[in-house]
Image: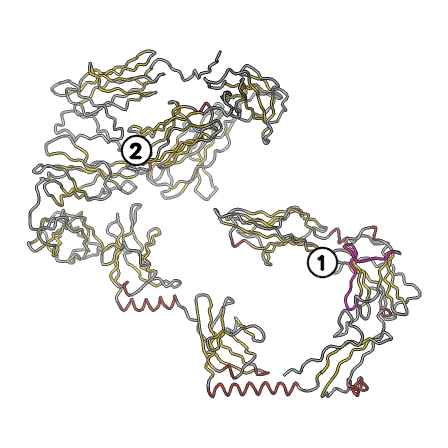
Amino acid sequence: MVEKYVREESMIRGPQFLTTLRSHTVWEHTPVKLYCTVEGYPTPLVKCIAEMFMFVHVQFPICILPGIHYRCETDDTAQYTAVAGNIHGQVSTQASVIVKSKSGKAKTYIVFNKCLFKRPIICPPLLSSAVPMLPEIKYTKINITFLETFGSVFGTEGDTVTLAATMTATPNLANLQPEAQWFRDDHRLSDSKWVKIESARGETKLTLPHLNKDDEGVYSLRMVTKGGDAVHSAFVSYGPPPVPGAPGAPMDIKIHDANRDYVIVSWKPPNTTTEGPIIGYFVDRCETGTENWVQCNDSPIKICKYPVPGLFEGHSYYFRVRAINSHGISKPSRISDPITLTMPYSSTVGVPSAPGQVVATRETDTSLLIQWAEPKEPNNLIGYYIDVCVKGSKDWGSANHKPHKNNKFVVQGLTTGETYAFRVQAINELGLSDESQESSPLSVKAALTTPSAPYDIALLACDGESMVLNWKHPVHSGGSPVVEYYIDKHRHGEHTWREINIPPIKERLFKVEHLSAGAVYEFMVYGGSLAGLGAPSAPSKAFHCDAWTIPEPGPAYDMTFCEIRDDSVLVEWKAPVYTGTSPITGYFVDFAKKGSDEWHCSNESHVTGLEVGVSYVFRVRAANAEGAGKPSLASNPVVAKAVKGTEMTCTVDEESGDFILSFESCQITESSHFVWKKFYKEITDFSKGIVIKTEGNISKLIFKHPDQGDMGCFSVAVTNTDGVSASHEIHAEELEKMLAKSYGIRHPVIPLKTQLAYKILERGRMRFWLQAEHISSAVTYKFLANNNELSPTNPNHASHDVEAGIIEFVLDHFTEDSEGTFTVQIEDGKARGQSSLVLIGADFKAALADAEHQRSEYVRVKDGPHFSEFLSVHVGDDCSVALICKVIKHSPKRRIEHLCQHMYTKGRLGFPFHSPGSSATELAIHCTATGIQLQCHMKYYTEEMKIHWLHVERKLSHSEKVRIGGTPAMATMEIIEPTDKDKGLYHIQIIDTDKTYTRTIDLSGHGKPDHIDNRGKVLGGLPDVVTIMEKKTLSLTCTVCGDPKPQVTWLKNGAEVYTDDQYLVSLESGKFASLTIKRVSLEDCGRYTMTVQNKYGGESVDIVVSAYKHGDTIPQAKPTLTPKSIIPPKRPIEIPGPKVVTPAPSPAPSHVSSPAAAKSPTSPKGLKSPTPARSMKSPTPTRRK
């Protein structure tokens, strides 16, 4: 028998009204809306009936009638019934609508409104004040349009399914955004572990990270506004299991009765109808932090509950369940939430837990509204205390002096424009809770309000079928710009106003079409902003829809005023829409004192002759060949009085050379903006490098590429002020001066004290040089001869002196080919300089002759005694060594002549040497950074000499432990990292042809020197290469040791790093050294070196740091193995003197008193190692010319 498992909790059989219809008694022409909500399974069919007439039927799983409403007439009185029914039954709800009027008529005309976002039409007030009226109902009209939607999805278990949609809202008001609500089979979904909901402005997304049978159903997205909602639905299907016939995964796994070593796991069967019957279930567990799932039961269990024993107290576990039937095993269920096993205990009531998220919103210009989430554990809560703090400080103060019982509070007495943060504490009889998290900082400003009504609706043109309207923007914007307008119309004498435009109008000029010729119309205009739709304007005058045929032009419109002074004002306007029968040739500007009908005419837009402090109104008349046309509507009053601080400055930037027109406004509001004009026409073309930069109340017009075309009159006006404006005219003469200054700034020249000159040096070398007023260390230069660059390397030479400002070049070979022009080109930052020297004709011949004379004099003077054969070594048969050289044309000093008298006759010099073994001193001890070095000084030492080192009686050879070597003055043997095994007698044997010389030292009393163990060391922890993303924080940390405690130094590319805002250098407890680099940038890349050193020496380690930008591919750094570098002690380390054992056959030389006093003799000049073969001579050098 096939077993079926069904979800019973969603099967509500009979229909049921959650919200019933409500009766209404209203006045005539008042909108009425009937609303009800019904649910049932299967989906009920809903019918709406007025007495015996059925008007509408709808079918929803949960039915929400969007509304039955229209402007009621006196005949609309009736009883309305909504009937919902399905196969399990039928229910109904009733409501009466009574429409009152003076005559008492009653009948119903009702329309079911499916346009949920339509703005209700507002009736004008009745003429009779005796008739009572309900308040006007105003709604913000919002249209929702889906741009992209999701379709049906057929997935398999474990898939990730994403449903996404994008939409637009019209009007798009920031504080009236639609709410996205997701439903599955009409059950509202919320964000959870298995359902992820993400919504933003204009888009929303629902993600099912692990598709399960629980997720199957109809998914609906409802974009909800106050006027209704827009809905889109699609089906998500759970596909068949991976093994044909296997059951689906169990559902709704829960953990119960968690104790110290066991839990009880429960679940629901798979929601399947086609697979075979379930045989049983397997329960798996997994310890948190691992991925090892262990099956808890050996054989399938048949009930949906299982106690899991054998757990460990204090450990956390996940659980899952698998179902099994005759075809196979299902996929695992969703894993449970983690559960930690602890001993059950009874909780005690304490102070409340901390309140939740704190949110601040604007209230007025001196107050803010604070709201917060209630604590999860109130524990007999008494109230809350609210703390306030200015952003950037830690000075918290209390906003209330007694507990506040609600989770909303208005903080009063704040400073306008200041930014504050808030936090909240809960309190009960036991005390205060922990502080909540701080709110986001918020500036104190007045809350946004809807704009005031537009006004002065004007008719600009009419062709018998359409009218062109213009109006003035609202006086008060409510804190945000008015960006949208809506227009209503009606015929004169009618009471019903009708919408003209569904999409909002962005400009204050609109052509109303589809009008009836000869009819009379009135219009109303609404303004909209972020805060919503404002009040309507007063009805316009009655406009006749008759085609205009007059020959004169129509009225101008949109008058504005700038450059208001004590006796003048500049008037600007827009040209008429209707031009008449001929082109417009000019304008008349009329002005009159406020309240007077006496108009005066001016033929210029710059009206002069006004009285200081008097208010004037203006109007404009356009004229053509037929005469002057209709005047525009009168302007708002303008006071002829100059405003302080209306001067514009014109400068050239000293750094960039840009032209800058700058204006600082003395008045400004939140909605104000700067309008820049040239010849009183707004600047809109920015292709020629013109930039407008505004910060606060200062605005700048910047010319990045100034030229002759920038001459003219420039003006700026500040909107929403008392006519704040200024102008400046750039004349031709001023423009020339500014262009010259700009060129000098953009192309600076290095000033020179002296031009390029020359001086002849010894050997005939030529020195070219010049001196600048000042140069920096970053100066670069190059020398050219006849436009060919001269190489500054050997034998030539180039250099400069920053302090003296001298740049020089030494030319080693100045020959006949050097005739021509010599030039030096200098670049120092943006500045450049150049100087040339012409050497041709007689000037060049004189310079060349002088150079050749200096060269010949140098050869003549240097052609005295010199060596024809350089020093060489000659070893005799008796092992004696002689140094031999050959001299030609000598005039020796007396001392040398006496010493080498015999050799001169033969043309040779000789100096005999004795055997090195006889000159060997006693062994001396020298401590190095890595161990102990034994030294034996002698007359000379080479690696070819026959020398043996012995420890006790064992011969030593060169290895990693023992390093044998020497210098030209001594033989050495170093013991690396000595230990106790290295104690004992050490010998050196120097073997000559006829005798062996031995020197001995006893190291029995010396083991490993203290400085080996006690020097500064790096124990590890640092990488060779570090690669990190920009703006991250890098911490290089390692452990160091040494006695005394070492000093740690960090270097970057050889320069020492100090603690500042970017770097943090620390050494904790003398052990843990670290370097922290905050917000890593590309400039922080390089080689970092850490040195650890005390008086016994130390070590250094290199680390290479590289960075990459966000989004770039991480560079594959190849680590370079850099060994630690040993640092020797800063001064010699004293150790106790050793016992010197001197064998009788080999006495120490008489001139050596002790090993400590032994000094290595100076090695003879010219001695080379290894020793050359006997009679070897160096090659005879060629004579230098």
Magenta stretch, residue numbers: 954-970
Distance between the alpha carbons at the discs numbered 2 and 1: 79 Å
Within the image, what quadrant is residue 513 found in?
A: top left
Q: Position of residue 451 (x, y in %)?
A: 25, 39
Residue 859 lies left or right of residue 601; in this view the side is right
Asked whether 864 or 771 is in front, the reply is: 864
Q: Nearer the viewer, residue 189 or 706?
A: 189
Q: Vertically, is 663 above or below 115?
A: below
Q: Is residue 732 shown left or right of residue 963?
A: left
Relative to 1123, residue 316 above or below: above
Quadrant into which the C terminus falls = bottom right
Q: Which residue is disc 1 drawn over?
A: 1128
| Badge 1 amino acid | Pro
Q: Residue at x 52, y 67 (%)?
A: 777
Identify residue for label 2.
Answer: 144
In the rendered structure, the answer to whether residue 1166 lies left or right of residue 948 reads left
10 Å crowding of disc 2: few (<14), some (14-19), many (20+):
many
The answer to whether residue 967 is magenta is yes
Which sits earlier in the primary sequence, circle 2 or circle 1? 2
Q: Residue placed farthest to the right in the image? A: 1144
Q: Nearer the viewer, mark 2 or mark 1?
A: 2
What is the total number of numbered labels drawn onto the structure image?
2
Q: Secondary structure at mark 2?
A: strand
Q: Is residue 422 above or below residue 188?
A: below
Is the residue 41 above or below the residue 1011 in the image? above
Q: Which mark is residue 847?
A: none
For label 1, count other residues whose C-alpha is less than 10 Å away and answer few (under 14), some (14-19) or many (20+): many
Q: Relative to the observer, which residue lies in front, 861 or 367?
A: 861
Spot occupied by residue 229 in the image (x, y as percentages of width and height): 31, 28
